[in-house]
Image (cartoon, grey):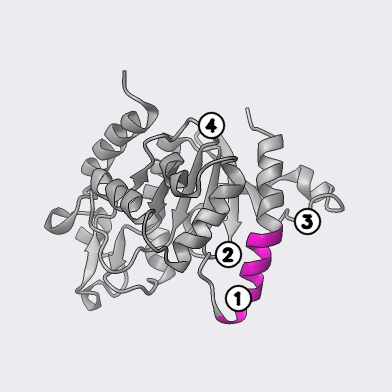
Amino acid sequence: MKTLSQQLALELSDYYLSEGIVPNDSFACKYYQESKCPDLNNEPRLARGMQCHIGPRYGEKLKILVASLDCGYGGAMTIEERTADVVKKSNERLNPHMRGTYKALSYFLDDTDPKELVNYMVMTNTCKCCRWVSNQLDIKYYLNCGCHTVEEIIRIKPDAILFQGKNAPAYCLDNNLIHSIEELKSLESLYSFSDTLKHFEYQGFRCYAVICIHPSARGRSANKRKHFYDEELPLIAQYIKEHPLD
């Protein structure tokens, strides 16, 4: 009998193949083929076909989907390659993005060895075209690619999505798939995070959506990032664990 992560890998592999989201020269995304992405001809070194990491123990604890921005320096990997890469790097020195991701996961996945956290989450990139270098693409790429993120979400069926960075939820916000939680808005004296914790809803599926500051935000955003990950996110995680959705 297949585990949940194995079932997801099969379903998502079939979806990626049907949409042309496959690594390297086989990449055939409809937006790429139709030249609808902006400045495509000026991005000759895009890493194409980014697939998601599926932790081998996903579903054994609270189901968390990390929806991040582009990966930079490559990223054209299959699910199996991506998962092997993420698990391998969990035993190495972490970059600021992954350090912040681990910190976030620790609030949701109680009593988990820090190096085991990646085994319980799924991580996707909200842009399937990624630069080879570590700088972000224009928001229009995320607005195009977001349809793929939504299709991933309804297959992965997380309890909560951690959208990392302002462009990560762009498609969902633009298409009214993320909604305020009225209970939080009416109880602001108890819950100060109504602008951050939302509901994602699509085709009858609903889960929590957390609009996160990017975990490696620097400069003027550094203090906001520190406050969010040290003070606000632990309260959000506690609320989600105490108020499971049907």
Residue 210 in picture, x, y percent from top left: 60, 52
Comes first in the chain, label 4 or label 2: 4
- Quarter-wise, where is residue 48 in the image? bottom left
Inter-mark Cα distance, 3 to 4: 28 Å
Q: Which amino acid, mark 3?
A: Ser
Outermost residue toward the right in this view: 189
Q: Give the magenta-colored segment's residue range.
A: 219-231
User: Is residue 206 on the magenta stretch?
Assistant: no
Q: Residues within 10 Å of mark 4 (few under 14, many from 20)?
A: few
Looking at the image, can residue 174 be seen?
no
Residue 109 in picture, x, y percent from top left: 56, 41
Q: Residue placed at 33% from the left, 29% from the top?
A: 7
Residue 213 in picture, x, y percent from top left: 58, 64
Q: Are marks 1 and 2 in contact (CB under 8 Å)?
A: yes
- Dot 1: element: helix
Mark closer to the observer (4, 2): 2
Residue at label 3?
192
Judge by depth and name the residue closer to the eye, 5 or 201.
5
Q: Which amino acid, mark 2?
A: Ile
- Dot 3: element: loop
Q: Are marks 4 and 2 in contact (CB under 8 Å)?
A: no
- Dot 4: element: loop
Inter-mark Cα distance, 1 to 2: 8 Å
Residue at label 4?
204
Judge by depth and name the residue closer to the eye, 6 or 203.
6
* Left or right placement of residue 123 versus residue 50 in this view: right
